[in-house]
Image (cartoon, rainbow, N blue to C red):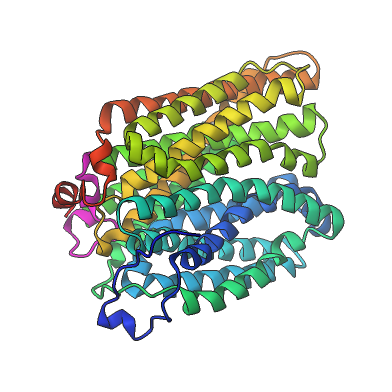
């Protein structure tokens, strides 16, 4: 990669442990590969679930917790993971997360019963919560605001979608050709290679010593975990589920307490000053709404492919490749678009295309095939996401001080993950309501319910578009090095 050298000069504290200087392209490759490992794992297990159920004797209800155990740990600990990186060093935290992820994958691949596998999946979530914010924070502090960071973020922003699509394909291949266990064991060699590469190629960031905000960490982690659990229960039992209601009540109390603690803490887990900047606050709102509309839609696309089009898990994974290829190609062009047009126009265009593609899916009929029913919407969605995520990341992380980079990254990914969880719960509820009294063939019932879910997904994305259009003010000046730093930093301190 020809990215210009843009690493910040290490402080004396960090230089003692810094590796020999490496090219920014090499550093970026190591960082995004670590993030790609988490992205692949988000879907690689999905297509292996039937084999896992047969192999370990899971009940249908218990099987869902193979995914939920990871979701709870990962979503609940992202904020804490970002703060750990700020205090202990982000490369050190990332390396620990990669090793923990590899170890838990090994334990899961060797599981002989359901309890063992669920514990390993929860441990994987802990590792992922250390990896995700650290990777994004390393890009934020290692590449200066402007073109260099935009190029790095363009690669990084494509990894989640590429990882999710690659996970579906890889999971289908490993499950079909070997065993469901390899859907987990594949992380072990990759994790070991990354753990060796990180100290060699990635410089350590300066540590920011201070008191750890234990009350904030406890209330924030418990509150976020309760909220994720409540939405998981909603997706399984509906909005009247007693455990879901109890989870929402607990989350409301804990998160209220969390905000009170953070407003008084000397070194908070979540600096509330992050919301002082209008563009960053608006970006956080959009990063919650966009996955809410999109990720739930992907769930129903998978159902439609396998149950209506009769695709195998492997073929269903390959069906997402046009979207992935379009998204990857688009994000590589986004830095040039930002330099020419500015963040806001590019983001508004991307959100509009993503909403249009999801709305197009709401027109699906049972007789539609892949070419006439799915290909066009998938291309539009891929184009829209490619134009949206990287400008959102750039908007949120612009002018963030190095001390707050981990917290800002952790909150970004917490909201993104929470948005996907909330969106899936909402769309599953919409699907259930739409199909409750629908008659006809199973294909017709599923398509009818999925179409309603896609329509609501499009409305959630349109809401994100409305927020971006009315709140965000970023233009060309915000995209140039130093163009926004002085004003935004003064508001964000």
Q: In this view, does 234 lie to the left or right of 432?
A: left
Q: Tell me, yes or no, whether the highlighted magenta stretch contains residue 275.
A: yes
Furthest residue toward right: 177
Q: Is residue 221 found left or right of 489 in the rendered image?
A: right
Q: Answer yes or no: is residue 246 visible.
A: no
Residue 122: which quarter of the image? bottom right
In this image, 359 relative to 465: left or right?
A: right
Image position, residue 411 (x, y; %): 36, 51
Magenta stretch in the rendered image: 262-278
User: In the image, what residue occupies the spot 51% across and 58% down?
Assistant: 73
Q: In which quarter of the image is residue 92?
A: bottom left
Q: Can residue 129 be seen in this view?
A: yes
Q: Which of 230 and 462 is in front in this view?
A: 462
Of residues 81 and 475, the one drawn nearer to the viewer in this rendering: 475
What residue is rendered at 74% in x and 52% in y? Answer: 171
Residue 25 placement (x, y as % from top left): 48, 63
Q: In this view, does 464 lie above or below 230?
A: above
Q: Position of residue 341 (x, y in %)?
A: 34, 33
Does 146 lie within the magenta span? no
Numbered disc total: 0
Q: Is residue 153 above or below residue 443?
A: below
**Image-quadrant location for residue 268:** bottom left
Look at 39% across and 70% down and name the residue there. 90
Q: In this view, does 148 lie above or below 138?
A: above
Q: Residue at x 26, y 31 (%)?
A: 471
Q: If the image is split into quadrants, where does the C terminus sit? A: bottom left
| Residue 206 image position (x, y, % from top left) | 30, 74
Tell me: residue 102, above or below residue 281: below
């Amino acid at each position: 990669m020809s990215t210009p050298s843009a690493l910040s000069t290490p402080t004396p504290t960090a230089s003692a442990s810094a590796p020999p200087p490496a090219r920014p392209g090499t550093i970026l490759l190591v960082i995004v590969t670590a993030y790609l490992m988490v992205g692949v794992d988000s879907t690689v297990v999905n297509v292996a679930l039937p084999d896992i159920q047969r192999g370990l004797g899971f009940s249908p209800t218990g099987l869902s917790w193979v995914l939920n155990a990871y979701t709870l740990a990962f979503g609940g600990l992202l904020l804490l993971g970002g703060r750990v990186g700020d205090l202990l060093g982000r490369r050190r935290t990332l390396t620990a997360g990669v090793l923990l992820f590899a170890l838990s994958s090994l334990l899961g691949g060797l599981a002989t019963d359901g309890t063992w596998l669920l514990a390993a999946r929860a441990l994987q979530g802990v590792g992922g919560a250390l990896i995700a914010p650290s990777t994004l924070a390393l890009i934020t502090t290692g590449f200066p605001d402007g073109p260099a960071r935009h190029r790095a973020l363009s690669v990084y922003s494509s990894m989640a979608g590429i990882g999710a699509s690659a996970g579906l394909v890889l999971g289908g291949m490993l499950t079909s050709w070997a065993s469901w266990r390899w859907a987990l064991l594949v992380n072990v060699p990759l994790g070991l290679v990354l753990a060796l590469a990180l100290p060699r190629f990635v410089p350590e960031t300066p540590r920011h010593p201070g008191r750890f905000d234990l009350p904030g960490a406890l209330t924030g982690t418990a509150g976020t975990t309760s909220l994720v659990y409540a939405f998981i229960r909603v997706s399984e039992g509906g909005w009247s589920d007693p455990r879901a209601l109890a989870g929402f009540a607990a989350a409301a109390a804990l998160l209220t307490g969390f905000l009170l603690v953070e407003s008084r803490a000397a070194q908070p887990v979540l600096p509330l000053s992050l919301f002082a900047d209008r563009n960053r606050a608006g970006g956080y709102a959009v990063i919650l709404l966009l996955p809410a509309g999109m990720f739930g839609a992907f769930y129903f696309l998978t159902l439609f492919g396998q149950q209506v089009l009769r695709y195998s898990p492997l073929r269903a994974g390959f069906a997402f490749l046009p979207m992935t290829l379009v998204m990857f190609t688009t994000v590589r062009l986004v830095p040039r678009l930002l330099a020419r047009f500015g963040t806001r126009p590019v983001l508004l265009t991307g959100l509009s295309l993503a909403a249009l593609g999801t709305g197009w899916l709401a027109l699906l009929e049972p007789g539609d095939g892949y070419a006439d029913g799915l290909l066009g919407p998938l291309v539009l969605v891929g184009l829209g996401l490619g134009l949206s995520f990287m400008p959102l990341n750039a908007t949120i992380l612009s002018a963030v001080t190095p001390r707050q980079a981990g917290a800002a990254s952790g909150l970004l990914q917490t909201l993104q993950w929470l948005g996907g969880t909330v969106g899936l719960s909402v769309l599953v509820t919409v699907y259930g309501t739409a199909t409750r009294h629908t008659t006809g063939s199973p294909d017709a019932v599923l398509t009818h319910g999925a179409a309603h879910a896609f329509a609501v997904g499009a409305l959630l994305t349109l809401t994100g578009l409305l927020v971006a259009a009315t709140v965000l003010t970023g233009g060309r000046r915000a995209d140039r090095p130093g163009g926004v730093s002085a004003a935004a930093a003064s508001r964000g301190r």
